[in-house]
Image (cartoon, rainbow, N blue to C red):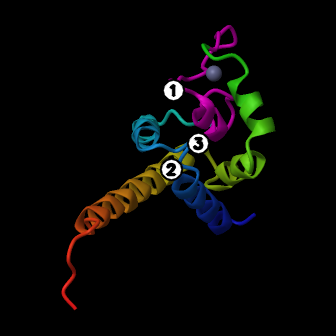
Amino acid sequence: MTQLDAILLIAWRLHNCRDIWTDQKLIDVLVFAVDGKLSFHYSCNCFLGVESSSVLHVRHAPKFICPEPRHYVKHKTSIDGAPEAEEAFLRLAPNDEGRNKKMVTLLQDEIGIRRREQEKSMEQVPGECVPV
Ligand SMILES: [Zn+2]
């Protein structure tokens, strides 16, 4: 998987898996990524970790107790495309700093796309007369 493949896969997932990537999740993870909290190496705050958390949290110490036990494992083994998404997150950049930066861009792009979609749908009011 090339870096471009990884970017496209993550962008596709953010746009199409809206049961997971709700408008609120995009914003929550954007704030998380701006703070540099995404990490490939920790199950709670890797890409699948944040997809599967109802409240984002960082695994930071050996004795850390996760508030949602096994959310990462359950998600990875039960959600379509999860292993591929995990690999794509790894390939986004050579380190977590780069991954956080790429995710900020991808999340901002998707938030912008949805905002434009909403504006467009508000312009097309059902039943409105359209001049021919
Ligand atoms: Zn956790």
Looking at the rendered structure, the number of numbered marks drawn on it comes to 3
Please say if 16 is above or below 83: below
Rendering coords of residue 16 (x, y %): 56, 57
Q: Earlier in the sequence, mark 2 or mark 3?
A: 3
Mark 3 element type? helix
| Residue depth check, mark 3 versus mark 1: number of the one nearer the observer | 1
Query: Is 58 positioned to the left or the right of 69 in the image?
Result: left
Badge 3, how many Cα within 10 Å: few under 14, some, many 20+? many
Residue nearest the observer in this picture, 107 or 62: 107
Please say if 130 is above or below 87: below
Rendering coords of residue 119 (x, y %): 27, 62
Q: Earlier in the sequence, mark 2 or mark 1?
A: 1
At a point 39% along the width and 41% down the height, the residue shown is: 27
Q: Is residue 123 magenta?
A: no
Q: Main secondary structure of the magenta part?
A: loop
Quarter of the image where ligand 1 sits? top right
Rendering coords of residue 93 (x, y %): 61, 54
Can you name the residue that lies furthest to the bottom here?
132
Q: Label 3 sits on what residue type?
A: Asp
Q: Earlier in the sequence, mark 3 or mark 1?
A: 1
**What residue is shown with label 3?**
96
Residue 103's disc number? 2
**What residue is shown with label 1?**
56
At a point 70% along the width and 29% down the height, the residue shown is: 72
At a point 41% along the width and 38% down the height, the residue shown is: 24
Please say if 36 is above or below 90: above
Q: The N terminus lies in which quarter of the figure? A: bottom right
Q: Is residue 43 magenta?
A: yes
Q: Which residues are magenta?
A: 40-66
Q: Label 1 sits on what residue type?
A: Leu
Question: In which quarter of the view is residue 58 placed?
Answer: top right
